């Protein structure tokens, strides 16, 4: 399935009331917070990983991402490609901690000028 295909199908479930940027942003933050809460329970409350629950929450996050993109009239495939292009520019060879430090140094120089 492509991002655009997912977006088209998922938006069939978005009511007019859902189509509000505040709702989309708050929903996205809330569902991402539920992923974080599951991780916290596993790390600090000694619970077992519940992959099914985490996958369900990730799906909810994806729905809100698709909703936000849809309201911006942007195909989800474009958002995905844009992100990959950004990462490729940021880490042209491969991800490394050295690349992060180099990038941080460049950001510091840029903000100083």
Image (cartoon, grey):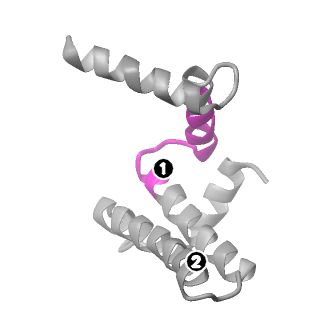
> Measured from the top left, where is residue 22 in percent x and y?
29, 64
Residue where numbered disc 1 is placed: 69
- Identify the residue at horizontal 56%, vertical 72% (top origin): 60
Instruction: Identify the image quadrant of residue 110.
Output: top left
Main SS of residues in magenta: helix
Residue lying farthest left? 113
Q: Mark on residue 5?
A: none
Are the residues flagged by discs 2 and 1 in contact, CB closer than 8 Å? no
Instruction: Identify the image quadrant of residue 28.
Output: bottom left
What distance separates the C-alpha of mark 2 from that of mark 1? 32 Å
> Measured from the top left, where is residue 76 in percent x and y?
59, 46
- Identify the residue at horizontal 64%, vertical 41% (top origin): 77
Q: Residues within 10 Å of mark 1 (few under 14, many from 20)?
A: some
> Measured from the top left, where is residue 33 in percent x and y?
44, 72
Q: Is residue 31 above or below residue 87?
A: below
Residue 79 painted magenta: yes
Q: Is residue 76 above or below residue 29?
A: above
Q: Is residue 6 above or below residue 4?
A: below
Q: Residues within 10 Å of mark 2 (few under 14, many from 20)?
A: few
Which quarter of the rendering shows the C terminus? top left
Which quarter of the rendering shows the N terminus? bottom right
Residue where numbered disc 2 is placed: 43
Q: Is residue 34 above or below residue 67?
A: below
Question: How many numbered tags mark residues here?
Answer: 2
| Residue 82 as seen in the image, left or right of residue 17 | right
Mark 2 or 1: the one toward you: 2
- Identify the residue at horizontal 46%, vertical 23% (top origin): 103
Q: What are the residue bounds of the magenta stretch? A: 68-85
- Identify the residue at horizontal 69%, vertical 26% (top origin): 94
Sequence-earlier tag: 2 or 1: 2
> Measured from the top left, where is residue 53 in percent x and y?
66, 82
Helix, strand or loop for disc 1: helix
């Amino acid at each position: 399935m492509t991002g655009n295909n997912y977006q088209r199908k998922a938006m069939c479930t978005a009511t007019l009331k859902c189509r509000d940027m505040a709702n989309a942003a708050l929903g996205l933050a809330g569902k991402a917070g539920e992923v974080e809460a599951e991780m916290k329970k596993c790390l600090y409350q000694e619970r077992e990983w519940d992959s099914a629950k985490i996958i369900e929450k990730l799906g909810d996050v994806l729905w809100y991402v698709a909703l936000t993109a849809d309201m911006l009239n942007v195909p989800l495939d474009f958002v995905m490609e844009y992100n990959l292009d950004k990462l490729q520019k940021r880490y042209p060879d491969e991800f490394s901690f050295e690349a992060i430090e180099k990038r941080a140094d460049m950001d510091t120089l840029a903000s100083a000028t």
